[in-house]
Amino acid sequence: MTKKLFIKTYGCQMNAYDSARMADLLAPLGYGATETAEGADMVILNTCHIREKAVEKVYSELGRIAKAKRGKPDMLVAVAGCVAQAEGAEIVARAKAVDLVVGPQSYHRLPEMIARHARAGGHVLETDFPALEKFDALPQAVSDTGVSAFLTVQEGCDKFCTFCVVPYTRGAEQSRSPESILAEARALGARGARELVLLGQNVNAYRGTDEHGRDWSLARLIGTIAEIPSIWRIRYTTSHPRDMGDDLIAAHGDIEKLMPFLHLPVQSGSDSVLAAMNRQHTADDYLRLIDRLRAARPDLAFSSDFIVGFPGESDADFEATMDLVRRVEFAQCFSFKYSPRPGTPAAAAKKQIGEAVKDQRLQALQKLLLSQQDAANERAIGKVLPVLFEKSGRGKHQVIGRSPYLHPVHAEGGAGLIGQIHNVRIQARTANSLKGALLESLPA
Ligand code: 5AD
Ligand code: SF4
């Protein structure tokens, strides 16, 4: 490798996947990964537009990169991801150091954009939504992968929640063909991945068509990936409650490799807020769905996303959210203050909630969610859990992995354990993780 490539990734797991694929794509051009922008020949910021601060962070990072570029004027600077899609030419107007702007559906065109820039100079922008062209154009070879690897199966969203930019930045729902996903799953397994996390903005809305014209649901896809011997664990994220099909619910009981942890965003526990958000489900629909999932797999651990301070949210609405949380008992959650996003319907709503109220509600919700997370971690103490080890820990002779329930687990042991599943007796917990002692090996 002769040229240094620095990629900084913001936002969701799909961006992490996209960053890895961009690195794969640029490797044949001689680019190899480096850890800092200073001295890099190319810098890519793979950006997120989901909440306000994310955009501001990108612009301040671009300020720092502009300084690094002063010492290395031929450094190529690219902005990729959802801010690139949403802001387009605005970025080059605001940040002069930027050479390339590429949306999440067009990054397979990066080599061609680099060539165009080399020929003609100036800015090169690509923010089209060419349907699934990206997945056909990306290289088949998968670069070095971790023990747990992301695999995008679906992209985009047709739900149009009134707070969300995703349908505008990632485009309409599209599913990759089962054949191309299975080929990538096998390639990842051959490279050492033992867990696959199937990604999609609405992953459970997956509906792929195979070469015989037959439709595949996510449940069928998971069932088929589960037949690949090198893949031991399967997860998927993010799901929408409305797309939780009967076969997917059943899969949680039937497919052993499908891990008992489900991220199922609900956003609010108030029916009027849910309606204003255009979520297309009620709080009761969500609770019944949780019951059905627990009936299929009693030890299923749940996580969710919440937004507080959505326009018009009253104290009673917020209490309904707290009530829903108490009823479900989540293992781990994400919660956010509503952030008006340009171009989304809720941003134009009249009854915006003041910052102080948002702060107060977020604090109260996070306190409750943290107490549930602590309780879930506490319940793990004394249990024996099969842990898939992923990396070395900070301490010498320490390894870190995940339980089936996605808890990070630390144990004493050498790097030779990485990529293996071992039983661990859980002894203690810290704020976000568990500590335990290794027991006997499990057969793969
Ligand atoms: N403001 C606050 N949170 C948001 N999310 C999405 N859009 C917004 C917004 N405008 C949250 C939702 C979603 C998660 C990925 O980010 O909870 O599930
Ligand atoms: Fe956003 Fe998820 Fe709603 Fe799609 S389903 S609009 S990604 S919150």
Image (tube, rainbow, N blue to C red):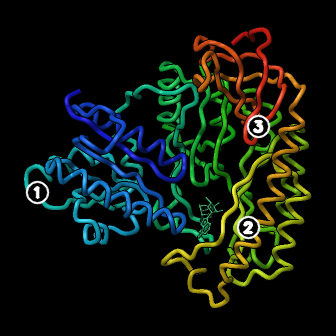
Q: Which mark is residue 218?
A: none
Dot 1 lies on which element? loop
* Image position of 438 (left or right of 48): right
Residue 243 at x, y percent in the picture: 70, 55
Q: Are marks 1 and 2 in contact (CB under 8 Å)?
A: no
For ligand 1, tell me if the residue under mark 2 lies within 8 Å: no
Q: Compare marks 2 and 3 and give the one earlier in the sequence.
A: 2
Dot 3 lies on which element? loop
- Nearest to the eye among marks 2 and 3: give it: 3
Is 432 or 288 nearer to us in this picture? 432
- Identified at 11% across, 49% down, the residue is 118
- Nearest to the eye among marks 1 and 3: give it: 3
Query: Real-space Cα distance between discs 1 and 3?
Result: 52 Å
What residue did someone put label 1 on? 121
Q: Quadrant of residue 249?
A: top right
Assign the N terminus to one quadrant of the image.
top left
Name the amino acid type tagged 1. Gly
Q: Are marks 1 and 3 in contact (CB under 8 Å)?
A: no
What residue did someone put label 2 on? 362
Query: Real-space Cα distance between discs 1 and 2?
Result: 47 Å
Q: Compare marks 1 and 3 and give the one earlier in the sequence.
A: 1
Dot 2 lies on which element? helix
- Identified at 72% across, 63% down, the residue is 306
Q: Compare marks 1 and 2 and give the one earlier in the sequence.
A: 1
Query: Real-space Cα distance between discs 2 and 3?
Result: 23 Å
In the rendered view, would you say 75 is above or below 391?
Answer: below
Question: Alpha-carbon neighbours of circle 3 within 10 Å: few (<14), some, or many (≥20)?
Answer: few
Name the amino acid type tagged 3. Thr
Name the amino acid type tagged 2. Leu
- Identified at 55% across, 61% down, the residue is 157
What residue did someone put label 3 on? 430
